C-alpha cells in the first residue's frame, strides 16, 4: 500500500502539479479569446437546419460512440506533443479553448447562461481534466526532450516515465469514455430540466 501511495504521490508531483496548471492556463486563456470572438459573431448570420446548414448548437445525433471517438482522437493529438517538443499539445489546447469559448459566446446570444452551464458541466467535469492530463504528458515529454538535447538529462525516456505516462493516459481514457456516456445520455436531460422544457436554437 505504501509503495502505491508513494508512486501516486510521485506521479502527482512530477506530472500533475506543474504541467496540468500550465495546460489549464493555456486552455483558459484560449477559451477567453474564443469567447470574445464568438460573442462578436451575429447569431443570425450562422447557418440553420432550414437553409442547408446544421444546427451549430445541437447536432442531429450524438451517441456515446461518436463522442468517445471524437474525444479520444483529440486525446491522441494531445499525446503527439510528446514527440513534437510539446508543440502539438499546446496547439491542441489552444484550438480546443478557442472552439469552446467561441461556441459559448455564440450560444449565449440565444440560450440563458444557466442552460449553457447545464450543457457543459455534467460531462465537462470529466472531459476537461482528461484532456489536461494528456496534455501534461505531452508537455512534460516535450520539456524533457529539450533538456536532453541541451545535455541536462542523461536519458530521454526511461521505463518509469513510460509507466507513469501510461497510468495518466489510462486514467484519461476512462474519464473520456465516462464523459462520452454522460454527454450522450444525461447532459441534454439535465439541461432541459434546468430550462424547464425542450431546448434548442429555433431555425
Image (cartoon, helix red, strand yellow):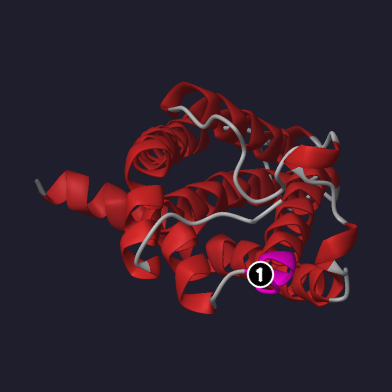
Residue at (85, 39) in percent of width and height:
51
Quadrant of residue 54 within the rendered picture: top right
Residue at (29, 48) in percent of width and height:
7
Direction from residue 132 to residue 3 in the image, left or right:
left
Q: Front-most of 97 and 200?
A: 200
In magenta, the rendered stretch is 105-110
Q: Front-most of 99 and 197?
A: 197
128 up-or-down from 67: above or below: below
- Find residue 185 and report its horizontal and vertical position in percent: 34, 38
Disc 1 marks which residue?
110
Residue at (55, 29) in percent of width and height:
61
Residue at (85, 54) in percent of width and height:
46
Magenta stretch: residue 93 in it?
no
Q: Front-most of 138 and 60?
A: 60
Direction from residue 19 to residue 129 in the image, left or right:
left
Label 1 residue SS: loop
Amino acid at each position: 500500500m505504501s509503495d502505491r501511495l508513494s508512486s501516486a504521490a510521485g506521479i502527482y508531483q512530477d506530472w500533475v502539479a506543474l504541467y496540468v496548471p500550465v495546460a489549464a492556463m493555456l486552455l483558459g486563456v484560449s477559451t477567453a479569446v474564443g469567447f470574445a470572438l464568438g460573442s462578436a459573431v451575429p447569431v443570425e448570420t450562422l447557418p440553420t437546419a432550414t437553409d442547408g446548414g446544421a444546427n451549430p448548437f445541437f447536432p442531429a445525433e450524438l451517441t456515446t460512440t461518436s463522442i468517445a471517438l471524437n474525444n479520444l482522437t483529440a486525446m491522441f493529438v494531445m499525446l503527439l506533443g510528446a514527440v513534437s517538443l510539446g508543440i502539438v499539445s499546446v496547439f491542441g489546447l489552444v484550438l480546443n479553448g478557442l472552439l469552446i469559448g467561441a461556441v459559448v459566446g455564440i450560444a449565449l446570444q440565444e440560450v440563458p447562461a444557466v442552460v449553457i452551464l447545464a450543457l457543459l458541466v455534467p460531462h465537462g467535469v470529466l472531459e476537461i481534466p482528461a484532456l489536461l492530463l494528456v496534455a501534461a504528458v505531452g508537455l512534460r515529454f516535450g520539456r524533457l526532450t529539450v533538456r536532453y538535447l541541451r545535455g541536462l538529462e542523461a536519458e530521454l525516456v526511461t521505463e518509469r516515465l513510460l509507466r507513469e505516462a501510461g497510468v495518466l493516459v489510462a486514467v484519461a481514457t476512462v474519464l473520456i469514455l465516462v464523459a462520452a456516456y454522460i454527454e450522450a445520455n444525461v447532459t441534454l436531460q439535465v439541461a432541459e430540466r434546468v430550462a424547464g422544457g425542450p431546448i434548442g436554437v429555433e431555425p
